[in-house]
Image: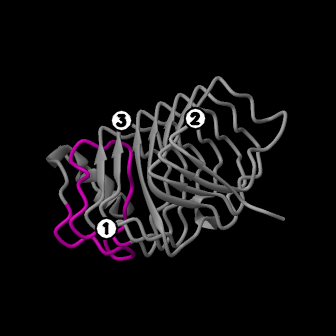
Amino acid sequence: MSRTYTESKQFSKTDFTVSNPPTGDYEDCDFVQCDLSGMDLSGINFTDCRFNECNLSNAKLLNTTFNGAKFSQCKMTGVHFSDCNKVIFDAGFTDCRLDLASFYKLKMKKTVFRSCQLQEADMTEADLTEAVFDTCDLTGTVFDQTHLEKADLRTATGYSIDPERNQIRKAKVALDGLPGLLIKYDLRIG
């Protein structure tokens, strides 16, 4: 099966649920208001691509590469980013809905999540060193054996992170975020 190569193309309001995008390499492409929900994007390489107002909920990402990908105002409920190419994963998220998404064991150093909803996401064993969670809702998100050194959680809400089960050295948290680090002790703060 041959791979396609697509460069600097804009896909606008494309319904990929009718047919999967061709397996191949996409470089510097824009996907605007596209429906990729439930699609099999396995083996596709996205380099410096931008996804705006797209629905990628429950998309299959086995060995998919996101290198320099930017997601803005996208719905990505239930997406298993943990199935992506683990050697190359570089993405940023702004105003995205990532509920029930899995980042299990993914290396995501310096990843920026800005104004995202990540309710009940799985960050188990992920490397989020120096990651930024700017104005994010982390209610029910699982952090277990997660690397959060120097991560910025100052404006994040709803998180519960056990400092004994996660590496949080030099992480930045706001004073009102401290209960999320102490929840297992059932303390009455205030």
- Asked if the stretch drawn in magenta spans residue 159, the answer is yes
Crowding at mark 1 (Cα within 10 Å: few <14, some 14-19, many 20+): many
SS class, disc 2: loop
Q: In the rendered view, does 130 fall on the left or right side of 25?
A: left
* Residue on which the image places disc 1: 148
Residue 8 location, x and y as percent?
Answer: 50, 41
Is residue 171 positioned above or below 48 on the image? below
Q: Main secondary structure of the magenta part?
A: loop
Relative to 72, 12 lies left or right: right
Say which element carries label 3: loop
Specify the quadrant that holds the N terminus: bottom right
Going from the N terminus, do you reach mark 1 or mark 2 first?
A: 2
**Residues at discs 3 and 2 in contact (Cβ within 8 Å):** no
User: What residue do we see at 43% from left, 71% from top?
Assistant: 107
**Position of 166 relative to 35 (above/below):** below
For disc 2, the marked residue is 75
Foreground tag (1 vs 2): 2
Q: Quadrant of residue 9?
A: top right
Density class for disc 2 (Cα within 10 Å; few <14, some 14-19, many ≥20) is many
Q: Is residue 166 left or right of residue 41?
A: left
Span colored in magenta: 147-171
Q: CA distance from mark 3 to mark 2?
A: 13 Å
Identify residue type, mark 1: Leu
Circle 3 residue: 115
- Residue 94, position in %: x, y? 39, 37
Q: Secondary structure at mark 1?
A: loop
Who comes first in sequence, dot 1 or dot 3? Answer: 3
Q: Residues within 10 Å of mark 3 (few under 14, many from 20)?
A: many
In this picture, residue 63 sits left or right of residue 145: right
